[in-house]
Image (cartoon, rainbow, N blue to C red):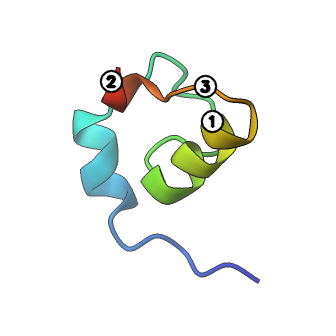
Amino acid sequence: MRKKCPNKALNEEDCPCPHADCENHGICCQCVRHHNEFGGRPACVK
């Protein structure tokens, strides 16, 4: 079981991702992992 991200609210303030409804929005480590699985890059590192 994953722990809740303690920085989610702070991360969401600066997150450039246009998909605010994504379950990984504001949870940077999960977002990066998700994009890596598909060979993509999240909006924050483009």
Question: 10 Å neighbourhood of mark 1: few (<14), some, or many (≥20)?
Answer: few
Which residue shows up at 34% across the image and 42% down it? Answer: 12
Left of 12 or right of it: where is 32?
Answer: right
Foreground mark, 2 or 1, reads 1
> Label 2 to label 3, Cα distance in Å?
15 Å
Which residue shows up at 22% across the image and 36% down it? Answer: 14
Sequence-wise first label, 2 or 1: 2
Q: Please, what secondary structure does the residue beneath circle 2 have? A: loop
Residue at the disc numbered 2: 16
In front of the other: 12 or 46: 46
> Label 1 to label 3, Cα distance in Å?
5 Å
Residue at the disc numbered 1: 35
Left of 34 or right of it: where is 11?
Answer: left
| x, y percent for residue 32 | 53, 45
| x, y percent for residue 1 | 77, 83
> Label 2 to label 1, Cα distance in Å?
15 Å
Sequence-wise first label, 1 or 3: 1
Is residue 6 shown above or below 17? below
Q: Amino acid at mark 3?
A: Gly
> Which of the 4 image quarters holds residue 4?
bottom right
* Quarter of the image with the C terminus in it: top left
Q: Please, what secondary structure does the residue beneath circle 1 have? A: helix
Residue at the disc numbered 3: 40
Sequence-wise first label, 2 or 3: 2
Foreground mark, 2 or 3, reads 3
